[in-house]
Image (tube, rainbow, N blue to C red):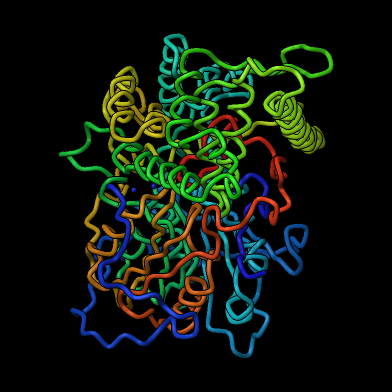
Amino acid sequence: MNRRRWWGSLTAVTIAFAVAGTGVAGSAQAQPGRAAQTVTTATPPGDATSKAEERRVDSVPKPKLSWFDCSVFSPGAECATAQLPLDYDQPKGATTGVAVLRLKAKDQKRKIGTLFLNPGGPGGSGVQFAAAAPYFLSPDVVDRFDIVGMDPRGTNFSDTVRCWPNLGAQVNDLSGLNVAFPFTAKETRDYVRSSEAFGRACSTTGKPLSGSMSTAEVARDMDVLRRTFGDDKLTYLGFSYGTYLGNVYANLFPDRVRSVAIDGVLDPVAWAGTAANAGVPQTQRIKSGEGAAKALHEVLVRCGTAGKRYCMLSEYGNPVKTYDTIMGALKKKSLAVRDPESGDVVFTISYADVTSWLLDDLYAPSGAAYVDSDLTFVLSLLDQQAAKGTAAAQRQAQARSALLAKVKAQRSARAVAADTKTRQRAASGFAFPYDNAPEAFQSVLCTDGLNPPRAQGWKKYAANAQRTAPDFGPLWTWASAPCASSTWTVRDEDAYRGGFSHVTANPVLVVGNYWDPATNYAGAVTAARLLPNSQLLSSDSWGHTAYGTSPCVTRAVDRYLLSVALPDRGTRCVGDDQPFTELLSSLNRGRSVPSRPLPPVVPPIPGAVPRS
């Protein structure tokens, strides 16, 4: 297929950020056949790895890897666990296990080296991501590289961080986080309470691993593994949060960069924080909310321009005003959805739920169609005055059935996943499966970035975010409330604080998508501006990240990885999927909902594993 995406390829992996621009002045549309050239522009001499970092990583012996067959993940895959220093200041001290999966290059005679992958998160599984590489990477890349994914320390198949002694304690402490974001006074109190409990738990029970999970530590792990696999320099492809890992590596080890491609780019200064901006929550200053709000507004405008033959919501009038009507009604009262047969209330739809669904919709390249469907059917459910037998009443009945079917499908999938985990743990003597995804995500976020002191303050910060990024601003802002520095007190003294302007041995490729709802396009602009030896590839595409959305982007990234050749300066690609360019009848959708389960209740944080 011409758009290689990994939505659904990995269980649980969906994978932030200054006001996004809308174009590159004077840029020309790149032709797929001429997406790259060898850059001859002079750059300053490359910077060297600091003596301190050399002492940290180069004194670590190559870990002995006992490979075993793990083709259960992917045909031909082999796996191992690398024992790496818990604290690189004590390279011969305690260790932590880091899980690694490798798919060997199909053309070993022409192998270039090792390509490290990271899907984002923080907390996404590099092991599962690498296992899926043949499904989303181009054949030439799979042929010429050993594909390697490592689960960052503390996560997934690596030795995991645990901030609670058991599942029950975790569930009790985090019960207030089981909303997309708090909106009512009670939800806010509960969310703050759970955020404070989260910080205290990871600052006590979670130690020492919770204090050794910053991105800098993962970059050091990756450098040791690079040397273990025999590569003189690193070849890397990272998405979403994985762009911060690539950026940190490039600045810690600038002379060890062969090719580092980062797609869906976090503003590194905003993510890490400075003394000047530490009073703004980390997930607000990266401006994901602004990126999502901009993308949704553009979808609604294009819906109105296209008309009802292309977009269902335009049948109700101006889509921007219709959206405001829907959200205004939900802010006043949540919507009860009843079983059409029994009349019982099956679930309720809140303002925060719909905001979360729309963010989930915008993650996909074809997300405009999902936005159209979700808003149309929520509006139909709100239309309680429709007379029986009318078209509006038929839409309303259809909406109830469609949403009910989506919820049942989601609950069934979650039940199957929970049952699988329970049986796996039971076989090992554990009756209750412990899922450390919450602390895996938060331990990286909170050790990487600076945050204000008290979780209670997030109510004010969310209100500020609502003014600059309607609806999506509060959703993103609240995600970092557990990082409040008075309760999340565990620190990684070796976390990276900058700068982000080191000159790398080879150029870094920075890829930004204008309409990314998670990693604001301006994050790519900032990262490329800071890195002296880098180049920005811009894409007028939809969804989260750009690789796979058009031959233009995919070929440019592939060629860079294979030959370190950059695209023409100023290249601007255009995604294959553009909103409302096909008639509804040609999509064979009519008035039906696209086949897709209901989005997770809690939004995907920058490339995160959705939390439930």
Q: Residue at x 30, y 33 (%)?
A: 281
x then y, percent, for residue 452: 26, 28
Q: Quadrant of the C terminus?
A: top right
The quadrant holding residue 487 is top left
Q: Residue at x 69, y 39 (%)?
A: 597
Q: Residue at x 39, y 32 (%)?
A: 480
x then y, percent, for residue 34: 44, 85
Number of numbered discs: 0
Q: Residue at x 40, y 28 (%)?
A: 478
Query: Where 107 sits versus 136, above or below?
Result: below
Query: Where 346 sits versus 227, above or below?
Result: above
Residue farthest bottom in this picture: 109
Residue 430 can be seen in this image: no
x then y, percent, for residue 479: 42, 32
The quadrant holding residue 399 is top right
165 relative position to 569: left or right: right
144 relative position to 342: left or right: left
Residue 211 can be seen in this image: yes
Query: Where 455 sits versus 211, above or below?
Result: above
Front one among 413 and 358: 358
